[in-house]
Image (cartoon, rainbow, N blue to C red):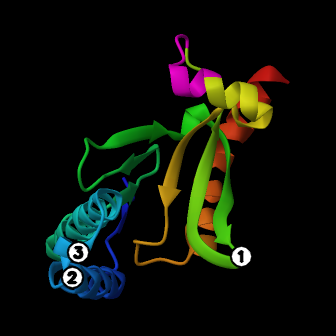
Amino acid sequence: MNEVHFYSSKTRGMVMLVISGVFTWILLYFDFYRESYFSLIVLCLGLGLFLFGIIFSLLLLLRRKPLLTVSDKQIIIYSVLRKPKTINFEEVIFFFESDMKYHGIKTSEYICALMKFREEKPGLLDRISAELMPGSQNIKYSIQTDILQVETKTLLELLNSRIRPYNLLNNEIKG
């Protein structure tokens, strides 16, 4: 069984740690006593967000296990704070690249999986997204490639090459 493991990018984790640390340091020495209640609440929420950024980046830096494992039959997506998710290649039609942009600047990259079957009992978020974006009904999983030590196009080619044997097998059975 041929497995490929992808680990977290330590340089991106370090950049996240430095940015979160600088903003947390600034917010800690901010004079809260002269601000209104609304500003105080916003500053406390910002402080909590940047403290979470420090914790998350430390978890990424100290992590020794892979964040993504691609084998011949399945993909295992490990999350830092959640249980791992398993995707069988038999259930996937194809993978495609998606990115988020803010004012033309790419902020994050994802590889999304278009599944063959829908869920029998979709959740509330799945029903709302199906109404708002009809083309996204079978998109169930996504892999954030920003925090991995791999180029998005390389990983996309690897994933689509692993799907082809299953798609060819299904076409031979049907035809």
The residue where tag 2 is placed is 30
The Cα atoms of the two marked residues, 1 and 3, are separated by: 34 Å
Of helix, strand and loop, which one carries label 2?
Answer: loop
Q: Name the amino acid, label 1.
A: His
Q: Residue at x 57, y 34 (%)?
A: 90
Quadrant in the rendering for residue 126: top right
Q: Which residues are magenta?
A: 120-127
- Up-down: is 139 above or below 65? above
Could you tell me if residue 105 is visible in this image? yes
User: Seen in the image, is 150 located left or right of residue 47?
Assistant: right
- Up-down: is 55 above or below 78? below
Residue 137 highlighted magenta (yes or no): no
Q: Residue at x 30, y 63 (%)?
A: 36
Q: What x and y, as percent, mark residue 120?
A: 55, 11
Q: What x and y, as percent, mark residue 142?
A: 53, 49
Q: What x and y, as percent, mark residue 129?
A: 65, 31
Quadrant in the rendering for residue 122: top right
Tag 3 and tag 2, C-beta contact below 8 Å = no
The residue where tag 3 is placed is 34
Q: Residue at x 26, y 88 (%)?
A: 22
User: Could you tell which of marks 1 and 2 lies nearer the N-terminus?
Assistant: 2
Of helix, strand and loop, which one carries label 1?
Answer: loop
Tag 1 and tag 2, C-beta contact below 8 Å = no
Image quadrant holding the C terminus, namely top right
Q: Residue at x 62, y 21 (%)?
A: 127
User: Seen in the image, is 173 located left or right of residue 75?
Assistant: right
The Cα atoms of the two marked residues, 3 and 2, are separated by: 10 Å
Q: What x and y, as percent, mark residue 9?
A: 34, 79
Q: Name the amino acid, label 3.
A: Arg
